[in-house]
Amino acid sequence: MRSALGLRLGLPLDALRWLAEQASKSGKVEDLEIESAPPGFRIGATIEQMKTKIRVTSIIYIERLRINESEVRIELRLEDTRLRVVGGEESPVAFLVRSGALDVSNPGTLVKHLPTIPPMVIEAEGKRIVLDLAKLPQLADQRSRMRRALGAVTSLITLHGIETDEGHVDVSFRALPAGVFYAAKTVRQNVVGPAAKRALRLLPF
């Protein structure tokens, strides 16, 4: 009750581990693991690059969140990033990893120099990577229902921070981040207005 009144929510870390198991079943990554490294997360996954399986581990800190109708900005800091070749493959990628020639101490800089960068990566430098999930195809269209719903919800309450302790994920929220009048205007534009237009189209005249 105290957490709810303070707009905080504690989730068991096992819930994230269950999601990790579901992601592993998709086949895009293998052995996805999530552990607490307060206040961040220690994440490990096995991926395949150029027919070489590589184990990637890193501690990820969520330094800042900014979520509203125009952006879903997540600022990350990655520490202690490591790569390890799984198996005895002999490939250019395996050689780079085993020799240490591939420097992953600054993963943001590494991402910055990739040939192709996903559009949701808007900044990458040093140990810092900034994502804007609003650039994903499902959210890129500002006229889409999902984007309007995002604007309405985040004008009322928005995600403010995510941290971990030894066994839980502590999620904090902020109510009315831009004030009451902005929330009323956004809900009117994104919910009431579209609903009224749909209702008028159903009328017989």
Image: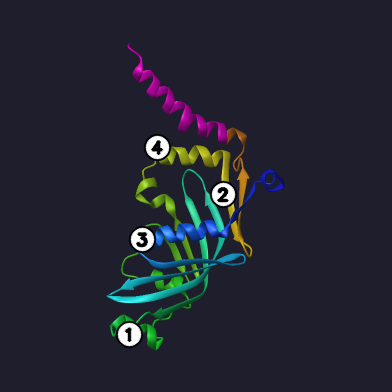
* Total count of labels: 4
Please name which of the two marks, 1 or 2, marks the residue nearer to the observer.
1
- CB-based contact (under 8 Å), mark 3 and mark 1: no
Decide: few, some or many residues near mark 3? Use Cα within 10 Å; few <14, some 14-19, many ≥20: few
Image coordinates of residue 47 in percent, x first then y, are: 36, 70
With 49 as the anchor, is 35 left or right in this view?
right
Alpha carbons under labels 4 and 3: distance apart:
23 Å
Label located before the other in sequence (2 or 4): 4
Q: Secondary structure at mark 1?
A: loop
Q: How is the image coloured?
A: rainbow
Q: Secondary structure at mark 2?
A: strand
Label located before the other in sequence (1 or 2): 1
Q: Secondary structure at mark 4?
A: helix
Q: Specify the amino acid type for callout 2.
A: Leu
Label located before the other in sequence (4 or 3): 3
According to the picture, the residue beneath numbered tag 1 turns out to be 88
With 153 as the anchor, is 21 left or right in this view?
left
Quadrant where the image shows the C terminus: top left
According to the picture, the residue beneath numbered tag 2 turns out to be 159
Segment colored magenta? 183-205
According to the picture, the residue beneath numbered tag 4 turns out to be 145
- CB-based contact (under 8 Å), mark 1 and mark 2: no
Residue 62 to residue 67: above or below: below
Q: Is residue 198 magenta?
A: yes
Q: Please name whichever residue, 181 or 49, is drawn nearer the observer in this view of the structure.
A: 49
Alpha carbons under labels 2 and 3: distance apart:
23 Å
Label disc, if present, on residue 118 of the rendered structure? 3
Alpha carbons under labels 4 and 1: distance apart:
49 Å
